[in-house]
Image: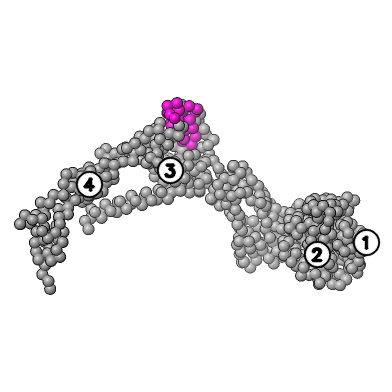
Amino acid sequence: MDMKVLLMSALLGFVSLVRSEMDNNVCISAKAKTCGECIQIGPQCAWCKDPGFKPSRCDDKDSLERAGCTQLGIENPQGRVTIDKNKPVTNRKIDGGQNLRPDEITQIQPQKLTLNLRSGESQKFTLTFKRAEDYPIDLYFLMDLSDSMQSNLENVKNLGTELAKAMEHITKNLRIGFGSFSESYVNVLSLTDDTALFTQEVSKQKTSGNLDSSEAGFEAIMQAALCTEVIGWRNAIRLLVFSTDVGFAGERKQGGNGRPNEEKCHLENNMYTKSNDFDYPSISQLVDTLSDNNIQTIFAVTEQFRDVYQELSAQIPKSAVGTLSTNSSNVIQLIIDAYNSLSSEIILKNSKLPAGVSISYISHCKNGVSEKGENGRKCSNISIGDEVTVDIEITATGCPSKGKSETIKIKPLGFIEEVEIVLDFICECDCHKDRIPNSPECSGRGTLECGVCSCNEGWLGRLCECSQYDFLTDDLDANCRMDKGTDICSNNGECVCGTCECKKRDNPEERYSGRFCECDNFSCDRSNNKLCGGHGRCECRTCICEVNYAGSACDCLLDTSTCLAANNQICNGRGICECGVCKCTDSKFQGPTCEYQKKWE
């Protein structure tokens, strides 16, 4: 093939590739009219604010620079992570061996961050969690006082003193409280560090017959969790030990008004007063309430109902089940074992995310174990002093909340500590702040913002050069589109007051034309590297051929003189003349005029 033809084919292929890339360029195809709209398309899109910039202002940064946009004229804001509070995790007790107050203990860092989020661009940070020594523990013992629990009650009377002694290796900062339920819930003793008082108050308790103690126990759990001030919960590890020897049916009350549980504290003189007004809480209500109040639940139940409470525990994060001996003689070891099981697992939970925001976790636990997905929120077998890290990635799509800041929180379940994350969404460019009213760039009739004119009332056009009263519509660009959805002036010109002004070419002999600049005189087919084969002219991308020439590139000669044989017959009467060349129809003959008979082998 001729080298010139190869080069031309390669050039046409390159032009086709460029056009295809432009069609696939999401920055351009989105047709953003403002810098804010442009940067929300995705992190790959930037904006040129240079006045007078003619190509698409919304494109990738490299393309804008190649098109002549100055470096200072490119708006391409980037997201970032700022750590606002980063108190180090607590490693040991304060000097002198004193116990640390809850507000002096830090197990998770950082504590507060600000994320500037651009649409489609994720921001990453790492949380560190380290279990502290002597972390304060509040333990509230909630006991079924139906008659069948009589022997169990006797063993619970000395729980306070014995439990504090047994847990010395875990914490010396222990408070303990007691509540009971039979027909209704009673807060017998709010949380205290006075173990003698615990023994004294529990010794006063008596059991009584009751056929409905299991569901009444759900009411008791709700009230013990919700009545924070009455119970005396601190910013500490909150343990609720629920002890019973009956299962639960999970049914609603029969009769009455059937009103759903209100999920509010209703204690008067330490007694629940709304038992006849509301239904028992549902399991989903229990799950949410215990989680929201950072309460870890230990179900201390008899062997007969262990499986039932195991199923319930599976639905309640940070809960455990222990089997009571017949008379609860093993209750202290049960509590310690359950606490060790609960505290050895770290589970991160985030608050509700704004629309369009997603979050992912990758945990790095002991022994080099890493997990992602839902397991990325967890680490197991964590002992006091162990440190684990979790990589967190947050991504926004678009611009939630119309650009207003949102705050989310991440916390390890069972702990009061939490991480506050302020989400600031990048919805506008910095140039949005530098608006110039009545700018000369806008003919003195509009505000220049990010290189684009926003015209005053009564004026239209790219430079506010057109009077609104001269047109029937405010959409001047509509007059410059061949069809709805097509490019303005076929992307070959500029719409000025509703009329296309076509681009100039570097070659003065080449030009765009037509009402919508849809025509040109240089894009016609070529033959022998010549436009229209050198035998015609290019009009609106179509060859108009000279007399005696035809074809898309005027490369078909209509003169038959070149097909005349010596006998003055066209192709010796054995073929047809096409574009000045004989095509023999008799397969026995060949030659320029089908004059030679083929020799058969």
Badges 2 and 3: C-beta atoms under 8 Å apart? Answer: no
Tell me the colour scheme of the image: one colour
Q: How far apart in space, not on screen, are marks 3 and 4 (Cα)?
A: 32 Å
Q: Which of the two discs, 4 and 1, labels the residue nearer the N terminus?
A: 1
Q: How far apart in space, not on screen, are marks 1 and 2 (Cα)?
A: 23 Å
Q: Residue at x 79, y 61 (%)?
A: 251
Q: Quadrant of the N terminus?
A: bottom left
| Residue 459 colored in magenta in the image | yes
Q: Residue at x 37, y 49 (%)?
A: 19
How many C-alpha atoms fall within 10 Å of the one at disc 1: few (<14), some, or many (≥20)? some
**In the drawing, does residue 107 fall left or right of residue 16?**
right
Name of the residue lying farthest toward the front = 573
- The residue tagged 2 is 248
Q: Give the residue type at disc 3.
A: Gly
Foreground tag (3 vs 4): 3
- Element assignment for label 1: loop
Q: Residue at x 48, y 39 (%)?
A: 33
Q: How far apart in space, not on screen, are marks 4 and 1 (Cα)?
A: 108 Å
Q: Which of the two discs, 1 and 2, labels the residue nearer the N terminus?
A: 1
**Range drawn in magenta:** 448-472
Q: Which of the two discs, 1 and 3, labels the residue nearer the N terminus?
A: 1
Please tell me in which quadrant of the rendered image residue 544 appears: top left
**In the drawing, does residue 51 fall left or right of residue 159?**
left
- The residue tagged 4 is 532
Instruction: Looking at the picture, tell me which residue is in the foreground, 210 or 120.
Output: 210
- The residue tagged 3 is 485
Q: Residue at x 64, y 46 (%)?
A: 406
How many C-alpha atoms fall within 10 Å of the one at disc 3: few (<14), some, or many (≥20)? few
Foreground tag (4 vs 1): 4
